[in-house]
Amino acid sequence: MSRKGNCYDNAIAESFFKTLKVELVYQNKYKTKEKAEKSITDYIENFYNTCRRHSALGNLTIEEFQNQQAIK
């Protein structure tokens, strides 16, 4: 949630939602809300966090980055 008058607070969330829409939502036509919810959950848990590399994390996946931080 953004603080009043600070447009930069939502930048990370907006970036994620753009990625989600471009990589998943716009590629599919969901017949039910439940199918959309399952698809989005699957994307986040089984691809975005575990397989997708993020340039802001040194081209590591979120899972790899978190494991690396836990070791330090």
Image (tube, rainbow, N blue to C red):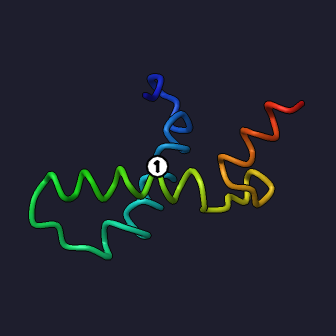
Q: Residue furthest left?
A: 32
For the point 56% across and 50% down, which residue is it? 49
Q: Residue furthest bottom?
A: 27
- Placement of 50 over or under 29, stated as above or below: above
For the point 43% across and 69% down, which residue is it? 23
Question: Horizontal placement of 14 versus 28: left or right?
Answer: right
For the point 17% across and 67% down, which residue is it? 30
Residue 21's quadrant in the figure?
bottom left
Which secondary structure, mark 1? helix
* Label total for image: 1
Q: Position of residue 37 (x, y in %)?
A: 24, 51
What residue did someone put label 1 on?
Answer: 45
For the point 47% across and 61% down, which residue is it? 19
Q: Residue furthest top?
A: 3
Residue 54's quadrant in the figure?
bottom right
> In which quadrant of the rendered image does the N terminus lie?
top left
> In which quadrant of the rendered image does the C terminus lie?
top right
